[in-house]
Image (tube, grey):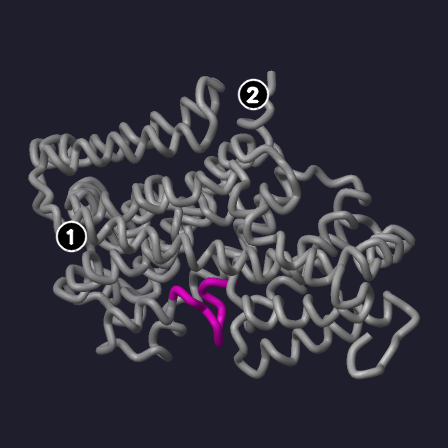
């Protein structure tokens, strides 16, 4: 009981707390603080000061010591070190030489390069920041439309949410207690499909308006093959991580650690300075602490939701609706699209999954398939105004490109994401094929 106000119905307390949380988020309070404070107040109201303090006090240690979470710093470190070792620039140069000749070639090269970098980074904002420095200057140099150049980088960065190693996929796996390895494998083919649809949208647009995205020619087959050794370390790391998880001879954390060790050795052999390596470690530590703090704060609210009975009530209501399950799924995805306008991707998943996930499973949907679909929705939220985080990252790195131009530039890719989600809804085998092979 707080300030002498007592509510007899835990469900009512849950609804009031959910409303308060949404108000705080709209007012601009960071999700980690809003969720932690509201969750603590809710637990105090339902259980009293002593039990609430005991529950909240154990969350940071119990969740930090979860083995599955140890994969996050490994994947994050791989991405930052690969950038400081110069692999990013070589990846973009190789993609430009191989696909620059198609309509919108540099933009297509950027998409494929971001997909390649996503396979060693796991962080969408880091991918967007890196290619804002690498790809945008090249596209502007060849006369690309500024809005399109910025939109390509912002959208390409989102591929890191699907293509393993993905930090958001790991977080989903931890929340719903699903296999991290199976989910990481499940994101591989949808990530490729998403990249191909992005590339197709660019090519069609460039054919309609060639002055916005001219092709780049002049590279010989010799130039193309000479570019491959420079990107071989990235393919090596991807092969190590995927094969280790698929074959089962290493856990995702062990595969990530092995990948980080390989990138570290390559960086040393390439003469990467100690300052750059230290910078990679510091950036990895900062991003890891940010993600861990967000998990701690939101899990306090999640514990409160469990005591309120709100998830069970929502599941019961959903399962009694007299409509096809796929219609309900589409409505859930539309709700995620709206939430993504006001919340960051990780916070949105952490807050909603404890309520939505039990209902989705009760409707008969596959846990891994739903995970990839909802992570793809989180990817859409990274480019959805007004809180499209990747758009802000591109604008922060390139302040000469107005934020409004960045948001205009992602319009085509929003259409591409809708197409991708429709494909994954219609053909769930794209998601489940690799995990099924691993299990068998």
Image location (x, y in percent) of residue 260: 30, 35
In-front residue for pair 337/130: 130
Magenta stretch mostly in which secondary structure? loop
- Asked if residue 54 is positioned above or below residue 183 in the image, the reply reads below
Residue closer to the observer: 421 or 64: 64
> Which quadrant of the figure contains the N terminus?
bottom right
Helix, strand or loop status at disc 1: loop
Instruction: Please count the marks in the image.
Output: 2
- For disc 1, the marked residue is 216
Q: Residues within 10 Å of mark 2 (few under 14, many from 20)?
A: few
Is residue 178 in the magenta section? no
Residue 332: % across, % down: 70, 58
Q: Are marks 2 and 1 in contact (CB under 8 Å)?
A: no
Does 187 sit left or right of 401 as displayed? right
Q: Which residue is mark 2?
A: 437
Which x, y percent locates residue 205? 35, 60
For mark 2, give the secondary structure.
helix
């Amino acid at each position: 009981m707080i300030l002498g106000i007592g509510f007899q119905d835990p469900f009512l307390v849950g609804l009031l707390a959910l409303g308060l949380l949404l108000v705080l988020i709209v007012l601009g309070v960071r999700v980690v603080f809003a969720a932690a404070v509201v969750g603590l107040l809710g637990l105090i109201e339902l259980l009293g000061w002593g039990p609430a303090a005991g529950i909240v006090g154990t969350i940071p240690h119990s969740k930090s010591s979860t083995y599955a979470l140890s994969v996050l710093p490994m994947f994050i470190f791989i991405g930052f070190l690969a950038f400081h070792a110069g692999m990013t620039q070589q990846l973009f140069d190789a993609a430009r030489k191989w696909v620059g000749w198609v309509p919108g070639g540099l933009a297509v090269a950027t998409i494929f390069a971001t997909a390649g970098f996503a396979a060693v980074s796991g962080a969408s904002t880091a991918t967007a920041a890196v290619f804002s420095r690498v790809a945008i200057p090249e596209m502007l140099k060849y006369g690309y439309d500024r809005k399109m150049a910025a939109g390509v980088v912002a959208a390409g960065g989102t591929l890191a949410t699907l293509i393993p190693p993905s930090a958001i996929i790991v977080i989903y796996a931890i929340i719903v207690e699903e296999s991290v390895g199976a989910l990481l494998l499940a994101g591989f083919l949808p990530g490729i499909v998403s990249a191909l649809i992005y590339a197709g949208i660019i090519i069609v647009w460039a054919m309609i308006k060639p002055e916005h995205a001219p092709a780049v020619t002049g590279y010989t087959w010799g130039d193309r093959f000479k570019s491959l050794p420079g990107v071989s370390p990235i393919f090596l790391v991807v092969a190590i991580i995927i094969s280790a998880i698929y074959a089962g001879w290493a856990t995702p954390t062990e595969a990530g650690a092995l990948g980080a060790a390989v990138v570290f050795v390559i960086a040393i052999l390439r003469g990467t300075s100690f300052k750059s390596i230290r910078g990679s470690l510091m950036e990895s530590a900062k991003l890891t602490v940010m993600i861990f703090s967000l998990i701690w704060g939101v899990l306090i609210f999640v514990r409160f939701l469990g005591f309120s009975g709100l998830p069970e009530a929502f599941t019961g209501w959903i399962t009694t609706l007299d409509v096809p399950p796929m219609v309900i799924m589409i409505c859930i995805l539309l709700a995620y699209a709206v939430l993504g306008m006001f919340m960051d991707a990780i916070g949105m998943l952490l807050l909603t999954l404890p309520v939505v996930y039990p209902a989705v499973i009760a409707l008969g949907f596959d846990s891994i398939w739903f995970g990839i679909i909802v992570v793809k929705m989180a990817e859409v939220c990274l480019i959805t105004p007004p809180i499209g985080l990747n758009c802000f990252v591109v604008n922060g790195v390139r302040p000469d490109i107005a934020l409004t131009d960045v948001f205009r530039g992602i319009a085509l890719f929003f259409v591409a994401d809708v197409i991708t989600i429709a494909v994954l809804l219609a053909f769930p085998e794209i998601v489940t094929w690799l995990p099924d092979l691993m299990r068998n």
